[in-house]
Image: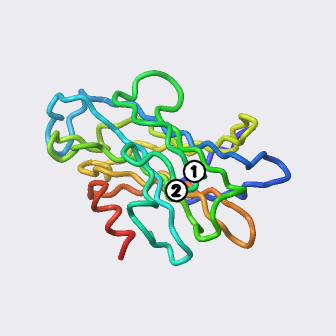
């Protein structure tokens, strides 16, 4: 049975218990456009939430932002060990809205951490933010389709005005892979988030 994580909690992705040849990171969300936020109602335009993965080196930084940021305009890493399922423009329907597939067993040794996030496309211009997003989650599923863990965001007033959410991370530690629930809201757009991991 899948583990429900709380913010900041991490678990070991056990090779003996799960098939980690391919790890699917599923991300999902619902939009509550009728909610009134700190910055007024949204513009009425459809929300377009985009998931992304940042492939970080041992120092916790991006080595090459053109190669190591996986999102709707760059769907796979150079060696195809990290692949994005493609852009879902509406987020409608049940289950995962977008998925990022990671071949942990063949991932390059230069990568020590993968940050999984969700960005609101043109959120500032459309007056959209994570205070208007509900039921956001990230889950880890092994190659056999077995759900390992899930982290669901709770509603939080601090999400008002935030354009980005770091949902979780997969990282190496002591020869093992671990998955950690983050739930960190950020005010920057995707370019700003990428820039913060370059410095």
Residue 60 or 34: which is nearer the viewer? 60
Is 77 on the left or on the right of 44, as rendered?
right
Number of marks: 2
* Number of other residues with Cα within 10 Å of mark 1, as a class: few under 14, some 14 to 19, many 20 or more: some
Q: Quadrant of the C terminus?
A: bottom left
Give the class, few, some or many, for how many residues have Cα within 10 Å of label 2's Cα (few <14, many ≥20): few
The residue at the point 53 percent across, 72 percent down is 57
Residue farthest toward the top in the current orientation of the protein: 93
Q: Which residue is mark 1?
A: 80
> How much space separates mark 2 and mark 1, taking CA atoms?
6 Å
Residue 127, image x, y percentages: 17, 41
Check the image and report above or below for 158 versus 88: below
In what element is the residue under mark 1? Answer: loop
In-image side of 131 versus 16 (left or right): left
The quadrant where residue 32 appears: top left
Mark drawn on residue 2: none
x and y, in percent, of residue 73 in the image: 36, 45
Left or right? Give the position of 32 relative to 168: left
Dot 2 and dot 1 residues touching (CB under 8 Å): yes
Task: Please state which of residues 131 and 144 is positioned toward the viewer in this rendering.
Answer: 144
Question: Quarter of the image containing the N terminus?
Answer: top right
Residue at left 49%, top 53%? 116
Q: Which residue is mark 2?
A: 78
Q: Residue lying farthest front?
A: 78
102 or 126: nearer the eye? Answer: 102
> Which residue is painted at 45% across and 21% down in the image?
93
| Image spot of residue 74 (x, y percent) | 41, 48
């Amino acid at each position: 049975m899948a583990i429900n994580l709380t913010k900041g909690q991490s678990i070991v992705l056990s090779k003996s218990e799960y098939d980690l040849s391919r790890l699917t990171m599923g991300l999902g969300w619902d939009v509550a456009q009728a909610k009134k936020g700190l910055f007024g109602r949204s513009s009425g335009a459809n929300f377009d939430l985009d998931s992304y993965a940042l492939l970080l080196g041992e120092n916790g930084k991006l080595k090459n932002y053109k190669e190591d940021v996986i999102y709707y305009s760059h769907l796979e890493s150079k060696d195809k060990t990290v692949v994005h399922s493609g852009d879902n423009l509406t987020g409608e329907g049940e289950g995962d809205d977008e998925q990022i597939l990671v071949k942990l067993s063949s991932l390059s040794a230069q990568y020590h951490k993968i940050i999984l996030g969700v960005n609101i496309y043109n959120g500032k211009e459309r007056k959209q933010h994570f205070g208007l997003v509900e039921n956001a989650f990230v889950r880890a599923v092994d190659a056999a389709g077995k759900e390992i863990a899930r982290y669901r965001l709770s509603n939080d007033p601090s999400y008002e005005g935030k354009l980005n959410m770091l949902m979780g991370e997969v990282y190496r530690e002591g020869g093992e892979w671990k998955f950690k629930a983050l739930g960190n809201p950020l005010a920057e757009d995707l370019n700003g988030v990428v820039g913060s991991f370059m410095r």
